[in-house]
Amino acid sequence: MEVNKEVVNLLIEDSDDSGWLPIKRARELAIINAIPLPELEALAMQRGIIPLRYQRNIGTITSTEQQVLANASVAVIGCGGLGGNVLEQLTRLGVGNIIVWDFDVFEEHNLNRQLLSSIDSIGQDKIKIAKERAASLNPAVRFQAIAGKFNQEQGRAVLGGCQVVVDALDNIPDRLQLSALCRELKVPLVHGAVEGWMGQLTTQFPEDRTIEAIYARPQNTTENRTISTPSFTPALVASLQVAEVIKVLLGRGETLRKKIMLVNLLDMDIDTIGIIEQGIGR
Amino acid sequence: MKVTVKLFAFLRKERFKASVIDYPEGTTVLQVLDALSITANERNIGIIFVNGHHALLESRLQDGDVLAIFPPVAGG
């Protein structure tokens, strides 16, 4: 479809001389010009007119960086305590393309911590609720939902185009598979995990083997047992993961590359220790 | 030889966060865990780093090493 960009420009510039584009006006302009909202907003941002809902992002990030986020693709693998909070924040920040992958439905025991769960959503697919939530927060997000258990074969087909993948899984075998796949696809992986008062995270670049170093020993502690997790641990670790995602996307600040951050909320200790993945040090 | 032992998460319970401990030459990680009464069940978990490198239970420690032990966290 041929879009008259001059018309778009004129309408955008005419819409508000403050430099901010309200969503209501953006939607009108998208309809008038028969182009999708994300494209309309992208055109506006190219001209330094930023969607108004991002106003309080600017300063923390620049308007140019806001455009980078709008063009970015991030996948969130797992949509539980971590994934729901990660999705919420990525959406509000304005990450333009988000993949969410989960196989599960909401259950009553999710209510204590999973942001997307509610009394009304019990029994419903997590990815369905995730999609609705994302659309309600930021209609410019292109949302791709993947139903089913994470697996490498399907992952190979959909994750290659992402700039960052977020590990919000709940078990070690899947994490090791995701780590190997991200290495193969050369996509950075932001790992997070929670249990009880404890959380951990790290950011693995394709050249690294950090996840393998963390989970190197045979593990069986999450099999055949119910782990407890309160509301605050996943919310915190998810926030830390999102900060890592944004820094990787923007190429800014210090990440937790080759480091693991260990969060202990019972004693209020946060430790970051360096990790050298190969060998045993001697 | 002196080894700095750092414990994380529930391993600290009734033990310590970090302590410099004197061990005989050639002490292994496993012997340190035994000396700290870290049970087989607790040990099962073990993410073990010596000076930032992933280490094994059988790894022998040297004077000045920093041994970090933490349980795996894997929920989401």
Image (cartoon, rainbow, N blue to C red):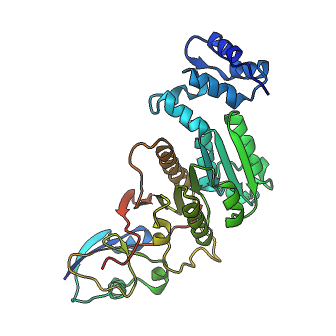
Can you name the residue that lies furthest to the front here? A2
Q: Is residue A142 above or below residue B72?
A: above
Q: Position of residue A223 (x, y in %)?
A: 63, 76
For residue A197, side relative to residue B68 (left or right) = right
Point out residue B50 in the picture as x, y percentages from the top left corner: 33, 75
Q: Position of residue A68 (x, y in %)?
A: 54, 36
Q: Is residue B10 left or right of residue A179?
A: left
Q: Locate residue A140: give its quadrant.
A: top right
Residue under the image location 19 percent in, 83 percent down: B1
Number of marks drawn: 0
Of the 4 image quadrants, the one containing the C terminus of chain A is bottom left
Q: Is residue A37 above or below residue B35?
A: above
Residue occupying image coordinates x 48% and y 41%: A250
| Residue drawn at x 24%, y 82% as measured from the top left | B62
Identified at 57% across, 10% down, the residue is A17
Q: Quadrant of the N terminus of chain A?
A: top right
Q: x, y percentage for residue A2?
A: 77, 24
Nearer to the camera, A22 or A37:
A37
* Looking at the image, residue A173 lies above or below residue A207: below
Q: Is residue A130 visible?
A: no
Whether residue A264 is visible, yes or no, is yes
